[in-house]
Image (tube, grey):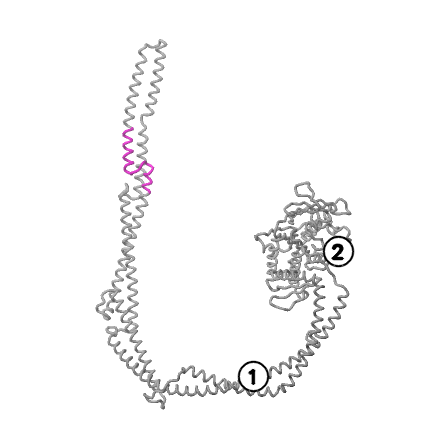
Amino acid sequence: MILKRLSASFGKLRDASLELREGLNIIEAPNEAGKSTWLSFLFAMLYGLDTRSRDKKEQLADKNRYAPWSGAPMQGVLECSVSGRDITIERRTLRSNSPMGQFSARYTGTADSVPGLTAENAGQWLLGVPREVYERSALIRQSGLSVDHHVELERRILALVSTGEETSSYTEVNGRLRDWQRKRRFNKTGLLPRLEAELERLGGAIDGMYRINAQAAQDRAALEEWIRKRESLASARDAYRRLDARGNWVRLSRAETERDEAASHLADLKRNLGGAAAFSREQLLELRRALSGLGALRASLSEVEKMLAAASLDLADAEERVNASPFAGMGPDAAWEAAQADLREYAHWQKRASFGKIPLFLWSVALLAVSAVSVYMALSGSLSFWMPAVPLALLAGGDLLLLWLGKTEQLRAKSAMILLVHRYSAADSSLFLEQAARYREDFALLEQRRVMEKQLESNCASLTAQYSEKRKDIMGGIRRLDPSADSDEAAELAVAAALDGWDRLEAASVALKNAGMVYEALKSSLPSDAPPPGDDPAPPEISREAVEASFAEAETEIRRLTVSLASAQGRLQAVGDPAALEAERDALNGRGERLLTEYDAISLALTGMEEANGLLRARFSPPLNEKAGKIMGMLTGGKYDRLYFDKDFSAAAVETGEAQTRSALSLSQGTLDQLYLALRLAVSALVLPSEKKAPLLMDDALANFDDRRMGYALDCLLEEAKNRQVVLFTCHSREAAAMENRSGVHILRLTEWSRP
């Protein structure tokens, strides 16, 4: 079922309407804006208004509490979608003693009534459950998250798993059997726990005695073996001591040879140092830094020379473009004035090219007019018949003269215009000023490149002078080092070779010093009783490290085993006679078997009775606890992951990773609200028919949630909205702000209605 649109005259709502959508609807409204009124109106539209209830001292009956403030009749319209069909439900008031007593249900947009849908069964028909079940599952009123027991909810749960009840005979027999069972075992008290404790004590004593004897025998054998091994290792240690003394002579001789070779190598390096001997290491490093600076200066000079060559090419190109212009040799302003003068001349000749056309036309008109008058007069007898021929002849002659003069002037004008256009190599006069503007730009570029070339020539000359002067100073020192070094590259190689020579000389000095120190140390450490050369003892078959490690291990084990044997002897004396302990244990085992047989028989009887009695609750409680625990984990960010509810929905929670349960009474108000919201959602999932998709209606259900858990709850509700429509009324803005622009979320913001 999907709620679409509500229209209400109900309480403070005066001809108000509310548009809802699929998914999660968040309706934000301040206090006294009608959130709880909308929720009660929707419940009344589904299940009707209880007109039989009466006002109480602490509470008004709904028919009086929600009487319209405006004085209008109580009425409303509910538009919804059920199984793909849109339905419109109306409840109106015809009699004052029966508010919202008239009911109609029809398919939206038609006059067809919905079969089987009546005022009495509307909620059951649409949602699949009676009002008491819906109130305790998917309808969450303000401060009403907890779930209480009700016969209808119990009936619905029983209907899901079949039926059954507990009888008085079960209670009586169950109590008697449990008394017998507790006498034999109750937690850690009773006959069996006492007997088991005594058996455990005896068994421990006997087993300990056998273990001590077995361990003592092993320790004695191991001690003898370790003593033999220690004697063998002592002989190997003495052999290595004598070998060490012999090795000292060999190492002393080798150290003396290495000292003499180091001294000879140092002398050879000093002789081969050459010109570098006149320089200190610091002086050579300074020469290398100077050569590096000279190289950088040489690179800069090369770069400037390249830039100068490029600038020269650019200057030549600019000069060529300026000289190719029809304004070559002029300044920019003179070129512009010349172009304007040529343009004016072109316009003058253009006008002259049309000379003679207008006079010729006028002359021809006059000729025709005079001819017409003369002919008319001749025909009327006013003139002789040959008189019209005279003006005609004169006019024809003038017409020919004007035609000849016009053609001559046109030829002259066109020739002048062609010469002007040819000068600019242009198609027409529109390019005169354009070429003058281009000449101005080319002339400015030419001047700019001349300045740039002069600047680069100056920079190049300055760098050349610096390079020559610096190179002269450096090469003076280089020639003292290597007279044959006449290039920068040769100078760098000479300095690098000199520095390498100094490095090798210093390394040889250090090697000689170290060799001398080794020789003196070996000489002073040579023991006075060291065997002379030639007395070479045979080396042991195992390494020195293995001998030392094994000898130390043998000493440790011998001490440990000696202490262990002494301790075992004392414990054996404290245990007592083994035969007496065995006889006592056999007697206790016989008595324990009898008690255990009785206890198992009683337990089996109790188990059978409890399985039969608890079958119904066993079918429903685990799915409810599991579902609610999973939702509680989502609402608390994983802090709690298990919930337990008894028959009357009293709750306990378990933190993730913990075993101890916490009663709902020990939780904070916010956590308690989260627990009962988890229960509500779990109950809704289990008891509401899935095919009906009953909407979840909530009024300020998250008021006690902190911002983080509110976010978890909204995510959970958004996930729930995939299966059923969710409508959340809230007086806070944080819910809407948290879910703004989320897919599947519809946010409405209502203002406060005032009493008329």
Q: Is residue 541 left or right of residue 609?
A: left
Prevailing SS of the magenta stretch: helix
Pointer 1 or 2: first along the chain: 2
Q: Quadrant of residue 464?
A: bottom left
Magenta highlight on residue 463 = no
Q: Quadrant of residue 595?
A: bottom right
Residue in the foreground of this view, choosing between 1 and 76? 1
* Place of residue 501 in the rendered image (x, y in percent of width and height, measured from the top left): 28, 73
Residue in the foreground of this view, choosing between 702 and 649? 649
Crowding at mark 2 (Cα within 10 Å: few <14, some 14-19, many 20+): few
Name, please, the residue furthest toward the left: 484
Q: Is residue 359 left or right of residue 752?
A: left
Question: Quick check: marks 1 and 2 in contact, CB under 8 Å?
Answer: no
Looking at the image, residue 616 lies above or below residue 220: above
| Mark 1 residue type | Ala
Disc 2 designates what residue?
59
* Place of residue 75 in the rendered image (x, y in percent of width and height, measured from the top left): 71, 46
Looking at the image, residue 181 lies above or below residue 409: below
Residue in the foreground of this view, choosing between 551 and 697? 551
- Label 1 SS: helix
Q: Is residue 504 left or right of residue 80?
A: left
Please give the name of the residue rendered at 58% of the width and 54% of the height, measured from the top-left corner: 739
Residue in the foreground of this view, choosing between 586 and 314? 586
Boundaries of the magenta span: 410-437
Disc 1 designates what residue?
214
| Mark 2 residue type | Gln
Q: Quadrant of residue 325?
A: top left
- Label 2 SS: loop
